[in-house]
Image (spheres, helix red, strand yellow):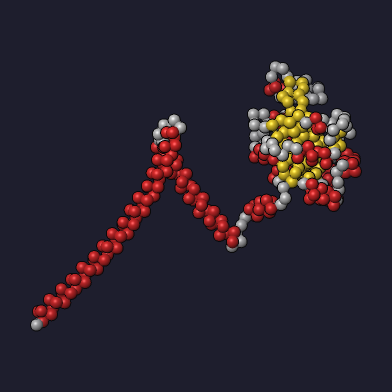
Amino acid sequence: MNGRGSSNRLSSTSGFRSRISFLMLSMFSTMAALYVAGRLWLDSENRVYLIQELDRRTGQGHSAISVDDTLKIITCREQQKRLAALQTELGKASQEGFVSKNLLDNSERDSKKKLLAVVGVSTNFGNKKNRDAIRKAWMPTGAALKKLEEEKGIVIRFVIGRSSSHRDSSDRAIDDESRHSNDFIILNDHVESPQEQAKKTKLFFVHAAEHWDAEFYAKVNDNIYVNIDAVGAVLASHLDKPRVYIGCMKSGEVFSQPENKWYEPEWWKFGDGKSYFRHASGEIFAISKTLAQFISINKSILRTYAHDDVSAGSWFIGLDVKHVDEGKFCCASWSSGSVCAAA
C-alpha cells in the first residue's frame, strides 16, 4: 500500500513539474517570437523606405544607394525619432512650467504685431544739436513715438556706441539723454569712432533684427531729414520682395591715396579700374528682414571697409538679392517725390 502511494505521489509531482516547464517554455517562446517579430517589422519598415529611396533615385538617373547612404538614411530616421521624443518632453515641461526664458521671449515676440520698419538714426557724441533738430522736425517724442510704433508699425531710434574710456562724461551724457528721451539704441560693445562707422552699421542691423520683428530695417544719418510717412509708403510698396536692398544706388572711384578724405585702405581689392560696385548711399537705405537676419547670423565673418555704405553693399554681392535703385531715397535735394533731404 505504501509503495503504491509513494508511486502515485511521484507521478503527480513529475506531471506538475512537466506542466511548469511547458508553461515556462511557452512564455519564453512567446517573448522571443514577439522580439523577432518586432525586429522584423522595424527592418521591413527600413527596407520599404530604402526601396522607395532607391526607386526615386533610379527614376532620376542616379545610381543605387551606397552603404554610406543607407547608414545616413537610418541615422536620419533615428534622429527624427529622438527629435519627436524631445518635442514630447518639451511639451510636458511647458505644461509643468519648466520652459526656458528664450522660448518664452520668442513666444511673446511672435505674439506681437509685426512691424513695418525699424529705423536707426546713426549719431555720435558731439551731435546733440542734430538729434534735437530731428526730434523737432520729423521724429516724434514721448507718447507720440510709441503711437507711431503701435499705429503705423515704425520704430525709430538713435544709434550710438560707447567712448573708448567707458563711463566718461560722454557716456554719462548719453545715458542721461537716453533716460530722458527713451529713444536710443546704445551699442555697449562698440567703441564710437569715425573709422568704425561700418562696424557700427553692422551692429545696428544685428541688434535691430534680434530685438524687433519687422519687414524692413533702415539706416539714416543724423544730418538727414525725412518724411517718415513717405518712407513707410516706399517700403510698403516692396513687401512682395523677400530679399530686397533699397536705396539711392551709386558707384564711384576708389581712392588709394592716404591723404584723401575718402581713402580706402583696401583699395587693391576693387580691381585695376578702382571703381566701387553698385551700392546704396549711406544717407538712407533699407534692407528686408531676411537680409537683416543674414547679417545677424554671419556678423563675425562679414567684412567691413572704410565706408559703411560700401560695406553694406559688399555683404549682398553673390546673394540672390533684389537691388532697388530708389530715386526717392536720393537726398541731395528735396526734389519732387523725394522722401529725404540733407541738412
Residue drawn at (73%, 40%) of the image = 216
**Left or right: 179 as drawn, with respect to 50:** right
> Where, by quadrant of the figure, is residue 75 drawn?
top left
Q: Is residue 126 among what the camera can see?
A: no
- From this view, report whether residue 71 is shown above or below residue 316: below
Q: Seen in the image, is 23 located left or right of residue 240?
A: left
Q: Residue at x 9, y 82 (%)?
A: 1
Residue 256 visible to an observer of this rendering: yes
For the C terminus, give its image quadrant: top right
Q: Residue furthest bottom?
A: 1
Find the residue positioned furthest to the top.
272
Residue 325 in the image, given as x and y percentages of width and height: 76, 29
Please tell me which residue lies in front, 173 or 23.
Answer: 23
Relative to 271, 22 lies left or right: left
Q: Nearer the viewer, residue 316 or 167?
A: 316
Q: How many marks?
A: 0
Question: Measured along the vertical axis of the image, is residue 37 above or below residue 288?
Answer: below
Residue 238: horizontal and vertical position, in percent?
73, 37
What residue lies at 65% left-to-right and 55% top-to-bottom? 104
> Which residue appears at 80% of the width and 30% of the height?
327
Between residue 27 and residue 13, name the one nearer to us.
27
Residue 248 image point, x, y percent: 78, 30
Residue 222 x, y percent position in the rendering = 84, 37
